[in-house]
Amino acid sequence: DITKPVAQIDGFNGVNPLLGLQALSPITGTAFDGPAVSAGLATIPAGNGVQLRLYDTVANMYWDNSGPQTFTVADGNAAWFSADSGSPSSWSSTVTGLNAALRSGRPYRVQVRARDTAVPANVGPSSDGTDSNFTLNTDSFTVVIDTVPPASGIVLPVDTRYYNVMTAING
Protein backbone atom coordinates (compact mmCIF):
# COMPACT_ATOMS: atom_id res chain seq x y z
CA ASP A 1 0.00 0.00 0.00
CA ILE A 2 1.74 3.14 -1.21
CA THR A 3 -1.22 5.47 -1.63
CA LYS A 4 -2.04 8.15 0.92
CA PRO A 5 -5.54 8.21 2.34
CA VAL A 6 -7.79 11.14 1.56
CA ALA A 7 -10.06 12.95 4.02
CA GLN A 8 -12.65 15.64 3.80
CA ILE A 9 -14.59 17.99 6.05
CA ASP A 10 -18.35 17.76 5.60
CA GLY A 11 -19.63 20.18 8.23
CA PHE A 12 -18.99 22.56 11.09
CA ASN A 13 -21.49 22.52 13.97
CA GLY A 14 -23.93 20.75 11.63
CA VAL A 15 -23.65 23.44 8.92
CA ASN A 16 -22.25 23.11 5.41
CA PRO A 17 -18.70 24.55 5.44
CA LEU A 18 -19.44 26.86 2.52
CA LEU A 19 -22.19 28.72 4.39
CA GLY A 20 -21.85 31.46 7.01
CA LEU A 21 -20.68 30.02 10.31
CA GLN A 22 -21.26 31.05 13.91
CA ALA A 23 -19.35 28.08 15.38
CA LEU A 24 -16.96 25.33 14.25
CA SER A 25 -17.33 22.46 16.73
CA PRO A 26 -18.29 19.71 16.24
CA ILE A 27 -16.42 19.14 12.99
CA THR A 28 -17.52 16.16 10.86
CA GLY A 29 -16.21 14.43 7.77
CA THR A 30 -15.14 11.30 5.96
CA ALA A 31 -11.90 9.55 5.01
CA PHE A 32 -11.00 6.90 2.45
CA ASP A 33 -7.96 4.76 1.77
CA GLY A 34 -7.82 3.27 -1.70
CA PRO A 35 -7.48 1.83 -4.24
CA ALA A 36 -8.98 -1.62 -3.73
CA VAL A 37 -5.72 -3.03 -2.30
CA SER A 38 -5.30 -1.03 0.88
CA ALA A 39 -4.00 -1.44 4.40
CA GLY A 40 -7.12 0.31 5.66
CA LEU A 41 -7.48 3.38 7.79
CA ALA A 42 -6.14 3.54 11.34
CA THR A 43 -8.66 3.65 14.17
CA ILE A 44 -10.10 6.70 15.93
CA PRO A 45 -8.78 8.06 18.24
CA ALA A 46 -6.10 5.56 19.34
CA GLY A 47 -4.56 5.03 15.90
CA ASN A 48 -4.75 8.69 14.88
CA GLY A 49 -6.85 7.60 11.89
CA VAL A 50 -8.11 11.13 11.32
CA GLN A 51 -6.32 14.24 12.56
CA LEU A 52 -7.22 17.91 12.46
CA ARG A 53 -5.57 21.23 13.09
CA LEU A 54 -7.06 24.71 13.43
CA TYR A 55 -5.23 27.91 12.56
CA ASP A 56 -6.05 31.48 13.57
CA THR A 57 -4.90 33.43 10.50
CA VAL A 58 -4.77 36.76 12.36
CA ALA A 59 -2.85 35.60 15.46
CA ASN A 60 -0.71 33.21 13.32
CA MET A 61 -1.20 30.46 15.90
CA TYR A 62 -2.65 26.94 15.92
CA TRP A 63 -5.21 25.54 18.36
CA ASP A 64 -3.74 23.78 21.40
CA ASN A 65 -6.13 20.88 21.92
CA SER A 66 -4.08 19.21 24.66
CA GLY A 67 -3.13 22.23 26.76
CA PRO A 68 -4.96 25.45 27.52
CA GLN A 69 -7.37 24.99 24.59
CA THR A 70 -6.55 28.29 22.96
CA PHE A 71 -4.69 29.38 19.84
CA THR A 72 -1.15 29.24 21.30
CA VAL A 73 0.80 26.68 19.23
CA ALA A 74 3.32 28.17 16.79
CA ASP A 75 4.48 24.86 15.22
CA GLY A 76 1.94 23.51 12.74
CA ASN A 77 3.46 20.01 12.96
CA ALA A 78 2.75 19.93 16.70
CA ALA A 79 -0.83 21.18 16.29
CA TRP A 80 -2.42 18.00 14.87
CA PHE A 81 -4.95 16.25 17.15
CA SER A 82 -7.15 13.19 16.64
CA ALA A 83 -10.83 13.15 15.81
CA ASP A 84 -12.58 11.82 18.89
CA SER A 85 -15.53 9.76 17.67
CA GLY A 86 -16.97 7.70 14.86
CA SER A 87 -14.97 5.64 12.41
CA PRO A 88 -12.38 6.93 9.95
CA SER A 89 -14.92 6.66 7.13
CA SER A 90 -17.41 8.83 9.08
CA TRP A 91 -15.66 10.78 11.83
CA SER A 92 -16.49 13.60 14.22
CA SER A 93 -14.48 15.85 16.50
CA THR A 94 -15.96 17.85 19.35
CA VAL A 95 -13.32 20.45 20.22
CA THR A 96 -13.80 21.55 23.82
CA GLY A 97 -13.66 25.32 24.31
CA LEU A 98 -13.25 26.12 20.61
CA ASN A 99 -16.54 27.86 19.90
CA ALA A 100 -16.12 30.17 22.92
CA ALA A 101 -12.59 31.11 21.78
CA LEU A 102 -13.60 32.13 18.23
CA ARG A 103 -13.72 35.84 17.43
CA SER A 104 -16.35 37.24 15.11
CA GLY A 105 -15.02 38.52 11.79
CA ARG A 106 -11.79 36.56 12.08
CA PRO A 107 -10.74 33.94 9.48
CA TYR A 108 -9.74 30.45 10.68
CA ARG A 109 -8.22 27.63 8.64
CA VAL A 110 -9.28 24.06 9.43
CA GLN A 111 -7.35 21.14 7.92
CA VAL A 112 -7.83 17.39 8.13
CA ARG A 113 -5.63 14.43 7.22
CA ALA A 114 -5.97 10.65 7.46
CA ARG A 115 -3.54 7.84 8.33
CA ASP A 116 -3.63 4.23 7.18
CA THR A 117 -2.26 1.07 8.83
CA ALA A 118 0.48 0.35 6.28
CA VAL A 119 4.03 -0.02 7.59
CA PRO A 120 5.28 2.65 7.39
CA ALA A 121 1.96 4.50 7.62
CA ASN A 122 0.83 6.63 4.72
CA VAL A 123 -0.51 9.97 5.88
CA GLY A 124 -2.63 12.33 3.78
CA PRO A 125 -3.57 15.08 2.93
CA SER A 126 -3.61 14.07 -0.63
CA SER A 127 -5.58 15.33 -3.58
CA ASP A 128 -5.11 12.08 -5.50
CA GLY A 129 -3.49 9.50 -3.19
CA THR A 130 0.06 10.23 -4.34
CA ASP A 131 0.82 13.84 -3.41
CA SER A 132 0.81 15.74 -0.11
CA ASN A 133 -1.34 18.65 -1.19
CA PHE A 134 -4.33 20.03 0.65
CA THR A 135 -7.41 20.53 -1.52
CA LEU A 136 -9.31 23.75 -0.92
CA ASN A 137 -12.89 23.25 0.29
CA THR A 138 -12.32 19.52 0.73
CA ASP A 139 -9.66 18.89 3.38
CA SER A 140 -8.72 22.53 3.98
CA PHE A 141 -11.25 25.28 4.68
CA THR A 142 -10.70 28.91 5.57
CA VAL A 143 -13.87 30.25 7.15
CA VAL A 144 -14.83 33.57 8.70
CA ILE A 145 -16.80 33.33 11.91
CA ASP A 146 -19.82 35.63 12.28
CA THR A 147 -21.37 35.62 15.74
CA VAL A 148 -22.98 39.07 15.47
CA PRO A 149 -26.71 38.77 14.80
CA PRO A 150 -28.02 40.86 11.91
CA ALA A 151 -29.88 44.08 12.71
CA SER A 152 -32.49 45.86 10.67
CA GLY A 153 -34.98 48.65 11.12
CA ILE A 154 -37.48 50.84 9.29
CA VAL A 155 -36.94 54.59 9.13
CA LEU A 156 -39.90 55.46 6.88
CA PRO A 157 -42.80 55.30 7.33
CA VAL A 158 -42.43 56.74 10.81
CA ASP A 159 -44.05 54.63 13.50
CA THR A 160 -47.43 55.91 14.86
CA ARG A 161 -48.02 58.20 11.85
CA TYR A 162 -50.88 57.75 9.40
CA TYR A 163 -50.37 58.04 5.64
CA ASN A 164 -52.91 58.32 2.83
CA VAL A 165 -50.29 57.37 0.27
CA MET A 166 -46.97 55.64 0.88
CA THR A 167 -44.38 56.32 -1.82
CA ALA A 168 -41.39 54.66 -0.19
CA ILE A 169 -40.28 52.38 2.59
CA ASN A 170 -36.76 53.05 3.84
CA GLY A 171 -34.65 51.19 6.33
Image (cartoon, rainbow, N blue to C red):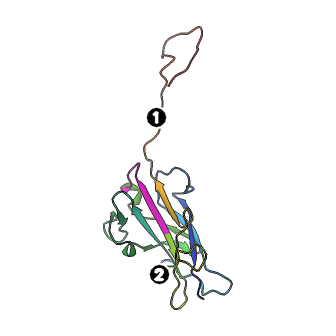
Side (left or right) of 26 relative to 70: right
Q: At which x and y percent is residue 155?
A: 47, 21
Q: Residue furthest right?
A: 36
On the image, numbered disc 2 is attached to which residue?
Answer: 46
Side (left or right) of 70 relative to 36: left
Q: At which x and y percent is residue 18?
A: 56, 54
Q: How many marks?
A: 2
SS assignment at label 1 = loop
SS assignment at label 2 = loop
On the image, numbered disc 1 is attached to which residue?
Answer: 151
Three-letter code for the amino acid on which mark 2 is drawn: Ala
Among numbered discs 2 and 1, the one appearing first in the sequence: 2
Q: Residue furthest top?
A: 164
Contact check, label 2 and label 1, Cβ < 8 Å: no
Q: Residue at x 56, y 81 (%)?
A: 4
Is-magenta flag for residue 43?
Answer: no
Task: Give me the C-alpha separation between circle 2 and circle 1.
Answer: 46 Å
Q: Residue at x 43, y 55 (%)?
A: 107
Where is 73 relative to 12, above or below?
Answer: below
Q: Residue furthest bottom?
A: 119
Where is 32 relative to 15, above or below?
Answer: below
Which callout, 2 or 1, points to the residue nearer the camera?
1
Is-magenta flag for residue 105?
Answer: yes
Local packing at callout 1 (Cα closer than 10 Å; few below 14, some 14-19, many 20+) is few
Local packing at callout 2 (Cα closer than 10 Å; few below 14, some 14-19, many 20+) is few
